[in-house]
Amino acid sequence: MFEKVLIANRGEIALRIIRACKELGIPTVAVFSTADRESLHVLFADESVCIGPPNARESYLKPQNLISAAEITGADAIHPGYGFLAESADFAEMCNMNKITFIGPRPETIAIMGDKAHAKEAMKAAGVPVIPGSDGLIETVEEALKIADEIGYPIIIKASAGGGGKGMRVVKKKEALESSFEMARAEAESSFNSGALYMEKFIEEPRHIEVQLLGLQNGEVYSFGERDCSIQRRHQKLIEESPSPAVTPEIRERITSAAVEGAIAVNYQSAGTMEFLMDKHGDFYFMEMNTRIQVEHPVTELVYDIDLLKYQLMAARGDEIIITDAERTIRGHAIECRINAEDPDNNFMPSPGKITEMHWPGGPGVRIDSHAYAGYQIPPNYDSLIAKLITSGKNREEAIVRMRRALGEFVIEGIKTTIPFHLKVLDHPDFITGDFNTGFLEKFA
Ligand code: MV4
């Protein structure tokens, strides 16, 4: 049970959390750095506290500042959003020690999933399909050579403390293994302070398919289908959709059941996402689990007609949640385009600055989650997401047509955005037919 929620985040997700709290009648506290004084989340919350300078390490990433802000305002729960401290087991633990409800899974669950080799082991034990590879960590080059011979090249070396693409090395043949192994180890040590490595068979041209989960305090875990997030650039997702054009009802049944079994095995509570790689045969393998609400959660909300933030808050409060059959049934299709303050014609270089003009699209099947407005100054200190444009329709084609129409109506002046880029992707024949994988944007002209 809790009475007041502090939102340990900024930008569109802070607003999204405040909106859910308002609908549940929960008072909110915003926190902000000095770069975010004029931000909408500060205005929309019931109270606000400045937690430090623009540099996130001294504000949004500083556990003690957030705990103090909660104590000063009497907030007895903290929602971390995504990024920043959302997947810090230490922060979750610190909240609990201070009698503040951390709105997320238990610290132990966050820690297991944060260690990728450990997470894989736990999921394998729970019967979730995993990519063939080393059993746990690899200590020496000799060991690496032996295991690679057993599973066959190409292989991929991953950092156990990594995730999201950092510290990976693909090895195509034996001759390259030793140097790749040493490089991966050095990179992992300097990036994560841990040289722990493991190995997997390299899956060619996979799709990124992820399952939305919600775990309740009574141990029940619900799934809400999948999202296809294969349209990525350098591990940054740009377009996501639900359902995946490549997932049949039969695959959906198997992938969601596997994800639920895996989540139950770690007593998963709160909203979470299990990420899989899916090959061209429709075989899927556990990749990692994100123990937070994700940027792309709205596509799932639209096709299942649910409010995931509300359910996440209710689950954390220990409310009884009754999920109806209708809420477990997909209706239609939804697509999200991430509108970033970046220049797609210049290597997606960040384009912070003042938004001089802004006109939002509207009409049927259009949703916008954004903290931006005309006159808003985008600070250079944080990620470049300024709006999520989500469209839905009776089917994929209608969602695409609406997205094209909505992107055409969207006016943002004063900065560069990814809008023109999205319009090009939406006209690509392989996007239109749904015939793409994680390599799409590398080949995209
Ligand atoms: C892989 C893979 C192929 N085979 N693992 C990238 C992010 C990190 N979570 C794991 N990643 C990959 N792991 C095996 N065994 C290909 C990728 C990958 C990728 C995965 C999802 C979305 C985009 C990607 C882009 C490049 C590589």
Image (cartoon, rainbow, N blue to C red):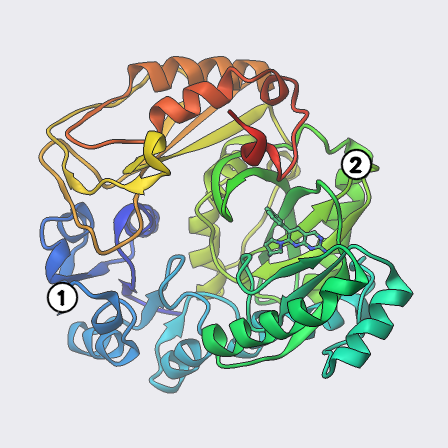
Q: Nearer the viewer, residue 372 or 313?
A: 372
User: What residue sits right under mark 2 in the picture?
Assistant: 280
Q: Nearer the viewer, residue 10 or 16?
A: 10
143 lies above or below 206: below
Residue type beneath disc 1 = Val
Q: Is residue 267 visible?
A: no
Judged left or right of residue 45, residue 123 is right
- Helix, strand or loop at label 1? It is strand
Tell whether label 1 touches label 2 (CB within 8 Å).
no
Residue type beneath disc 2 = Lys
Residue furthest front in the image: 175
Q: Quadrant of residue 62?
A: bottom left
81 lies above or below 303: below
Judged left or right of residue 8, residue 422 is right
User: What residue sits right under mark 1 in the picture?
Assistant: 49
Identify the residue at image location x=77%, y=54%: 258
Residue 108 at what x, y percent from top left?
Answer: 56, 79
Q: Nearer the viewer, residue 98 or 370?
A: 370
Q: Quadrant of the N terminus?
A: bottom left
Identify the residue at image location x=39%, y=60%: 83
52 lies above or below 165: below
Residue 149 at what x, y percent from top left?
Answer: 88, 66
- Helix, strand or loop at label 2? It is loop
Q: Is residue 325 visible?
A: yes
Residue 321 at what x, y percent from top left?
Answer: 54, 53
Residue 8 at what x, y percent from top left?
Answer: 29, 64
Observer-side mark, 2 or 1, equals 2
